[in-house]
């Protein structure tokens, strides 16, 4: 992957290093991008479509106010690469059954140990089940990895019917939060594999079917994603061996083009070498453009300011996510107190808005250990037994810390609810926003959601 990143950075330098951004500079950028992407086994047609759009946008699109011409082009390239690498499918942190699919050597069994480690370190118990009845040593390989990952293991050495092994394994492993099944591969997808996987599917009823493909097959990964999806159904793709392949870009983009979503990428042979896939972060890392983050932040802020609507601000449900964004914004832009103060609203309790860096870090890990559902419906965390305990464990904090975060959240929620109900305040704020009062300091973007 180092190659792709290096190539892309060199291509971008055609713009960032140019004296002026003119048609010649854009054309050079485009030519270099084409060369780099095709070398990385990205489909030629995709490459030409992408570079055509970049060229057109760079030369014709109006530049976002507040950015300079170079930033304008860099942002366009970034957006197009993110779109090329595809959407993510984020794994859920809940009780679930996962089936792994993939051809020989794609990295299924190795990935199972990585997944076991991933879910375990987030506070969930894990069981792994060997339903690879083809490979003689499949049993031992998975058993050893399971021991290393501290996960429960089930397998049968003699049985040749995979579905039967799964059936008995589910009973034998009993209550685990995450149950992962390793299936047999083949050297190519065929009817027999399809039949075996369908049989497993029928008894296992998985929540996720992750297809494992190796980055070194480049754009062939797209064909595999399509075959497995059409025959068995795929919820997410895991692209392994991103560390050693010069075709990672080809694999990711081909999977994206097949309409499958990427969940994880494997970046090494060790248990820890598994990363959540996020095209924005991934491309950001590849470009390693020194000011990219600052630029994106700036563009985001401009767009947010343009989009922030009073109606939205007053009507959205207050969630943990917004709570955290507000805390961050309050730290950056000065206390929200000011806004409330200008409107004559009661003061926001200082202890809520002025958290220490250490506390913010702690809040962040706690929030990361919540499920999406919990982040959007904070009420269930206290209501349903076991959630606080699980979040505390998963985040490596303790229950007291989780309760503290919830209590801070509730304080802020109460305040916002009161604020929304107060008609007088609402009118004043809406008026202020309409008169273009948006430049006032201290109004965090979180208010707009
Ligand atoms: N470098 C690297 N090697 C990997 C990765 N994932 C798997 N492998 C290696 O690929 C080979 C095949 O993996 P295995 O899990 O047995 O594949 P399976 O046949 O699909 O179960 C093994 O040598 C693994 O160590 C990865 O992300 N990076
Ligand atoms: Mg295997």
Image (tube, rainbow, N blue to C red):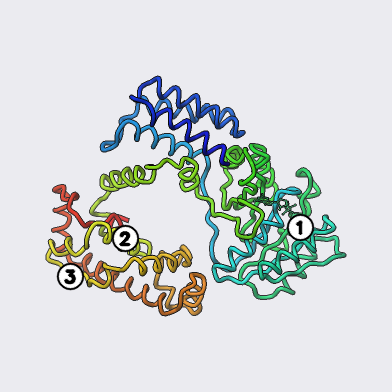
Residue under pointer 1: 199
Outermost residue on the right side: it is 158
Label located before the other in sequence (2 or 1):
1
Please state which of the two labelled residues, at mark 2 or mark 1, is closer to the viewer: 2
Q: Residue at x 43, y 31 (%)?
A: 13
Q: Nearer the viewer, residue 203 or 289?
A: 289
How far across and how far down the image is residue 307, in percent? 28, 46
Task: Measure how far apart labels 1 and 3 are at the Cα level.
Answer: 62 Å
Instruction: Say left or right for 57 vs 82.
Output: left
How far across and how far down the image is residue 44, in percent? 58, 28
Give the number of the disc on residue 328.
2
Q: Residue 257: which quarter of the image?
A: top right
Task: Measure how far apart labels 3 and 2 are at the Cα level.
Answer: 18 Å
Q: Residue 338: which quarter of the image?
A: bottom left
Task: Measure how far apart labels 2 and 1 are at the Cα level.
Answer: 50 Å
How far across and how far down the image is residue 152, in percent? 70, 71
């Amino acid at each position: 992957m180092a190659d792709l990143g290096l190539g892309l950075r060199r291509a971008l330098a055609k713009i960032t290093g140019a004296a002026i951004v003119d048609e010649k500079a854009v054309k050079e950028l485009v030519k270099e991008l084409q060369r780099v992407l095709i070398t990385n086994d990205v489909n030629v047609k995709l490459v030409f479509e992408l570079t055509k759009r970049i060229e057109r946008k760079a030369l014709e699109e109006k530049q976002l106010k507040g950015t300079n011409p170079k930033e304008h082009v860099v942002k366009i390239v970034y957006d197009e690469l993110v779109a090329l690498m595809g959407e993510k499918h984020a794994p859920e942190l809940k009780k679930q059954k996962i089936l792994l699919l993939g051809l020989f050597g794609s990295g299924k069994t190795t990935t199972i140990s990585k997944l076991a480690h991933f879910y375990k370190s987030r506070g969930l118990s894990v069981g792994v089940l060997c339903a690879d009845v083809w490979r003689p040593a499949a049993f031992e390989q998975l058993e050893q990895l399971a021991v290393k990952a501290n996960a429960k293991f089930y397998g049968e050495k003699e049985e040749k019917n995979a579905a039967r092994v799964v059936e008995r394994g589910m009973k034998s492993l009993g209550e685990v939060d995450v149950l992962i099944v390793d299936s047999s591969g083949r050297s190519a997808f065929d009817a027999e594999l399809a039949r075996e996987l369908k049989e497993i599917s029928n008894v296992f009823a998985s929540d996720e079917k992750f297809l494992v493909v190796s980055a070194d097959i480049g754009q062939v990964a797209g064909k595999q994603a399509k075959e497995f999806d059409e025959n068995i159904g795929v919820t997410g793709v895991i692209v392994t061996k991103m560390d050693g392949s010069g075709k990672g870009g080809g694999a990711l983009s081909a999977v994206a083009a097949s309409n499958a979503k990427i969940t994880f990428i494997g970046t090494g042979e060790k248990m820890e070498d598994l990363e959540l896939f996020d095209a924005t972060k991934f491309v950001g890392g590849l470009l390693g453009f020194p000011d990219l983050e600052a630029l994106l932040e700036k563009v985001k802020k401009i767009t947010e300011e343009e989009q922030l609507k009073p109606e939205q601000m007053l009507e959205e449900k207050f969630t943990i996510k917004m709570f955290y964004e507000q805390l961050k914004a309050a730290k950056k832009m000065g206390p929200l107190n000011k806004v409330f103060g200008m409107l004559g609203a009661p003061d926001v309790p200082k202890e809520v808005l002025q958290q220490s860096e250490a506390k913010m870090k702690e809040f962040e890990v706690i929030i990361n250990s919540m499920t999406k559902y919990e982040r959007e419906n904070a009420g269930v965390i206290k209501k349903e037994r076991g959630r606080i305990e699980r979040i505390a464990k998963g985040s490596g904090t303790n229950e007291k810390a989780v309760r503290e975060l919830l209590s801070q959240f509730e304080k802020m929620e109460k305040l916002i609810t009161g604020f929304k109900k107060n008609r007088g305040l609402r009118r004043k704020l809406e008026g202020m926003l309409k008169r273009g009062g948006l430049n006032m300091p201290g109004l965090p973007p979180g208010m707009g959601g």
